[in-house]
Image (cartoon, helix red, strand yellow):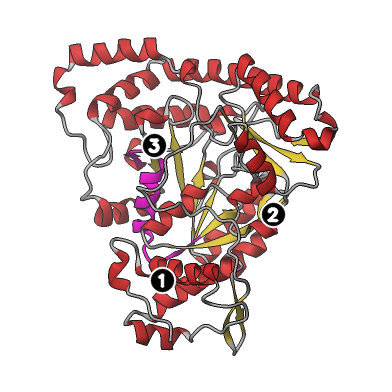
Amino acid sequence: MLTYDLSARGSTPRYEYLYRCLRRDILSGALASGARLPSKRALAEHLGVSVITVEAAYSQLVAEGCVESRPRRGYFVLARAMPGGFEPEPAASRPQPVWRLDLRSNRVDAALFPSGVWAKLTRRVLAENPDALLEGAPHEGLPELREAIAAYLRGYKGMAVSARQIVVGAGAEFLYLMLAQLFSGAAFALENPGYPKIRLAYSASGALCLPVELDAQGVNPGSLRRSGAGVLHISPAHQYPTGLVTPLPRRQELLRWAESTGGYIVEDDYDSELSYAPRPLPTLSSIDGAGRVIYVNTFSQTISPAIRIGYLVLPERLLDEWERRLGFYSCAVPSLEQHVLARFISGGGYERHLARLRKISRERRDSVLAAFAASPFAGRIEIAEPGAGLHFLMRVRTNQSDDALRSRAAELGLRLGFLSDYAFDARRVEQHTLVINCAGLDSERLKEAVSLLGRVLEDEIA
């Protein structure tokens, strides 16, 4: 019988720790391909945990393509090698490399931060309200900021929301942790491929994360129904990393799923402010008539990740439940920054900043696409670019593996990200597809990017 010391798990949820132990043994070959795992009940009794804990660990292994569930026979190891996932290495480990150029990270360009306006507003807040540094904000955020966000959403997004529906938090990851606690016990359906930190944040709170497949219109409703999840986390405006925009009929179909099953949809509106379409599609929240959508957004990409401010818009039906279960938390965002952001939004500074940011981002994106089209490797690439956001997919026609391309780039100091990095099972997504983040590619860095990519692919070009 498999034996693991679960007392060594620290703060890691039991199912997550058990999953990691099994994953480690599969990776090392201690559990051979074809080996039958103990039944859920037998392993639960042996380890002194619940059957649900073992089931969650097994389900995660099945979702990642490492274990197969055979009806009336049990669970069997499929392979010794684990597909390329995105679980981080333990902390305190290796030194972080210094990259000559990083095309994988979706960091904003620090030069675009409205430092002059921000400094002026900060001085004004401190002059008019010197206690702002010492004040404690209500757990849901300062009323002034919530009012400003609500007014912005009504005017810019067409969302009929009130300030009482808004909860301010310290960035998206913090808000994901709150949602995992709000829906404790529910399984979360996540886009596959999708943004890795979403899964990591939910899992850290003990939530079971299940992959749902994407088609050309976003989340596949059939895959969603088969998952049995109670909560769907989706980015319909501009999915990361594929860039897919979910059309209105599919959005309505997903809303019907939530209403018919009693489920909820977390609408992650990341990157939506950088859409270049003249009239973006309405948010799921704005067309939700049943109160089944929780809207999430942050100011990380549009202002700076350093200010760590995000927010939720809760449907009316969840307000009492949120207060009852999570109202004891203190607000994790400093009051001073909330005061400054409230004035930045209500005074029109945010909309002016967005207009400038969209213009620069579009020009930068167009320059990147033009430079790649004129590059020596132009004949070997295909760009999938939906006209929104700060990233796009670049398919490369090559005989090299993703790992070989990654290694070759790393030797040159170039950090690359691949679509396979974002999947639950790397074998089930298209290979040789790069996720290019172009936010930091000004004219000088763009020349360097073209040069380095050319060197990575030079064997193919020759």
Q: In whole angstroms, how far apart are the C-alphas of marks 3 and 2?
A: 31 Å
As drawn, 349 above or below 232: above
Position of the N terminus by quadrant:
bottom left
Residue at 51% from the left image edge and 49% from the top image edge: 196
In the image, the segment drawn in magenta is 166-188
Q: Is residue 114 left or right of residue 381?
A: left
Residue 147: mark: none
Position of the C terminus by quadrant:
top right
Pointer 1 or 2: first along the chain: 1
Q: Nearer the viewer, residue 101 or 14?
A: 101
| Residue 228 visible, this angle | no
Q: In whole angstroms, how far apart are the C-alphas of marks 1 and 2?
A: 27 Å
As drawn, 366 above or below 64: above
Mark 3 in CB contact with mark 1 (< 8 angstroms): no
As drawn, 391 above or below 366: below
Residue tagged by mark 3? Answer: 310
Q: Identify residue type, mark 3.
A: Gly
Q: Position of residue 461 (x, y in %)?
A: 83, 33
